[in-house]
Image (tube, helix red, strand yellow):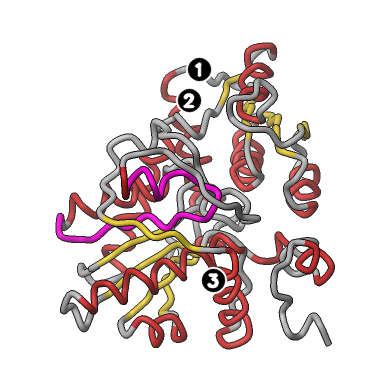
Amino acid sequence: MTAPQGKRSTLDLIGNTPLVLLKGPSEAAGCEIWGKCEFANPGASVKDRAALWIVRDSEARGTLKPGGTIVEGTAGNTGIGLALVANALGYKTVIVMPETQSREKMDTLRALGAELVLVPAAPFSNPGHFVHTSRRLAEETEGAVWANQFDNIANRKAHIESTAPELWEQMGGRIDGFTCAAGTGGTIAGTGMGLKALDEKVTIALTDPHGAALYNYYAHGELKAEGSSVAEGIGQGRITANLDSAPIDTQFRISDEEGLEWVTRLLAEEGLCLGLSSGINVAGAVALGRKLVAQGKKDARVATILADTGFRYLSTLYNQAWLEAKGLPVFPWLAR
């Protein structure tokens, strides 16, 4: 009799996500564009990795005690990951989120048993910003720890130790370029650091949405934001602890319209239902692929992150009235 082949813990379901060749983006770039399917994590996003590493790090340092509470400020996906990890390990969660985020994320957090605190959207300099509010709640709550995903480098460690080696193995030990957007900075910095340790010649590119300040920072040395974006969970106006020393070789700025074009095409042509951050990542991967091909790497391989599922944005990105209100193109099938 052989032993069962399944996972021994539900937490073992986090990571080891599939990798898929994206046909349309590959044709557009003139080289291979691969997507890491992070929507296949239990919480349906890349943030499950950071959530698990942050909780395990807190346990190892002795700050999170049995029956304790995890408090975090998040655009939603990290909170969902933390709630699932906390449920599996016997902790409670308090999640602070801007009230501008999708209804699906709010409903999901409540359904998972998290205590949800909504605050008005505000700049980071405002004391009412969701990150500052979550820190204060953690300080005021007995037995609580603050996850602090933006400046807790257990976040990027998750990608150094899991995302990067997974990509390296899945791509047969050759990756010419990797790119994704930055929210906390953990994914781009950690995956970049991990890949550079395996091959220093891998080109790491930041894909930045409009309204964020990092494109100008890496291109010109100045934190300066231009324009705006409706993408949730990405875009940063400061150098977080996770972004500190990130090995960024080049950078691209991608508009919502460009990202939405790839969201539309990947759903209509390849059957992938994704969020806007994934569309922006794919647009950046196409730009990076074209750049590498122009540099003579005709057989370049570029990887990016398919960060979460589009099912999390049915009331926003996949809603005709919402798209029209934002001045964005409507999916053709929604306008029928």
Label 1 or label 3, whichever lies nearer to me, is 3
Q: Is residue 211 in the magenta section?
A: yes
From what the image shows, is residue 1 above or below residue 115?
below
Q: Tell me, yes or no, if residue 31 can be seen here.
A: yes
* Separation of residues labelled 2 and 3 (CA atoms): 39 Å
**Depth check, front residue: 287 or 146:** 287
Task: Name the quadrant of the N terminus.
Answer: bottom left
Give whichever of discs 2 and 3 has the lower sequence position: 2
Q: Quadrant of residue 88?
A: top right
Residue indicated by mark 1: 63
Element type where label 3 sits in the image = helix
Image spot of residue 39 (x, y percent): 56, 62
Above or below: residue 67 compared with residue 301:
above
From the viewer's perspective, is residue 249 above or below residue 269? Answer: above
Query: If the image is split into quadrants, where does the C terminus sit?
Result: bottom right
Name the residue tied to disc 2: 58
Name the side, left or right, on which 189 lies relative to 111: left
Magenta residues (range):
200-218
Asked if the stretch drawn in magenta spans residue 214, the answer is yes
Residue 53 position within the rendered picture, expressed as x and y whole percent measured from the top left: 45, 38
| Image-quadrant location for residue 175 | bottom left
Marks 1 and 2: CB-CB under 8 Å? yes
Q: Residues within 10 Å of mark 2 (few under 14, many from 20)?
A: some
Image-based side of 273 in relation to 335, left or right = left
Residue at image mark 3: 258
Name the amino acid, label 2: Ser
